[in-house]
Amino acid sequence: MEENKKIRVAITHGDTNGIGYEIIFKTFSDPAMLELCTPIIYGSPKVATFHRKMLDLPVNFTIINTAEDAHEGKLNLLTTFDEEVKVEIGQPSKEAGSAALKALERAMKDFRSGLFDVLVTAPINKNNIQSEAFHFAGHTEYIETSVGDGNKALMILLNEKLRVALVTTHLPISEVAKSITKERIEEKATIFYNSLKRDFRISNPRIAVLGLNPHAGDGGVIGNEEQEFIKPAIEELSENGIQAFGPYPADGFFGSESYNEFDGVLAMYHDQGLAPFKTIAEDDGVNFTAGLPIVRTSPAHGTAYDIAGKGIADENSFRQAVYLAIDVFRNRIEYDEPLANPLKKLYHEHRDESEKVRFAIQKKREE
């Protein structure tokens, strides 16, 4: 990215019956946000206009057809489809899911073409969006498949107080235990560690690892996953230079605020980490997808059908998602810069042929 250009923030509009457009418009009604970045909403001008009028929000946007046409200092809206979309505020519908998917598909295509720097996704309904083109449990899995280039994604929920990553994400509880393996824990912890260093510029991260069972298994009395998989994984991580500690019982760990002693917390499954996180984070939590070439963030809440169209949605989580995406993008540049031109090797593994001959002659003389 050229130094004189603002960071281009792609924003997918999410479920068109939810609060996506409301939180986007509220965020960028602040002129200071347009000084910080160049936003490009991937959506529908007609749907956007409907939401703006319904909510009577004081914001203007410029309609563009390609990301290359985005204007600095303006809120850009890229037309991702021309079809009419029936907006049914607060109601789930396949039409809303289809509109969300079209925006995502165009964003993935444009990222592969290098047309924006970071991605912020407004909430989707995971049921409505399902189709032949989208058979994933959520944004994280879809983006990993679309632009991951073989890299594995890691879901991290965070705010200023806490960072929680998940070993398993959108899995039914009945499938969680059998999905907890030593290898999977090590993989996710390593991605977490690398992200804390590169994306958050923490030099030597400390990671707390939670147990799976109540009381972290009580030494095998209440389950043996801690003994068989989690402790061996922690030991292996420590041997590899990653400061991992635990396993800790989740209830006591969060109840005693032990997370303040660590740079990140690795939870075994979705609600184990996210239920306490959302209680602690209140309205400023952000969902960050680590481990991928793309920088992607999202507000840590859903479509909020119950308050959609009422004008009372709090945009702070979305605003924090924009801030985080920009910070991570800059941190990656800063982290990668010293590694861009490594020094050439000073020593060669194999001597050239003349050296080999010389040493052979010398050896014969000595014999």
Image (cartoon, rainbow, N blue to C red):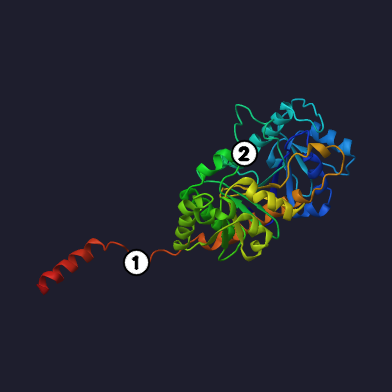
User: Of 326 and 96, which appears nearest the observer?
Assistant: 96
In the rendered structure, which amino acid carries the disc numbered 2? Met
Secondary structure, mark 1, is loop
Residue at 67% in and 31% down: 129
Provide the secondary structure element on which disc 2 rests: helix
Q: Mark 1, residues whose alpha carbon is within 10 Å: few (<14), some, or many (≥20)?
A: few
Q: CA distance from mark 2 to mark 1?
A: 43 Å
Q: Residue furthest front?
A: 221
Q: Is residue 136 above or below residue 228?
A: above
Camera-nearest residue between 219 and 106: 219
Residue behind mark 1: 347
Which of the 4 image quadrants contains residue 3?
Answer: bottom right
**Which residue is identified by label 2?**
108
Q: Residue at x 69, y 54 (%)?
A: 324
Give percent across and percent down for residue 146: 57, 38
Q: Nearer the viewer, residue 115 or 139?
A: 139
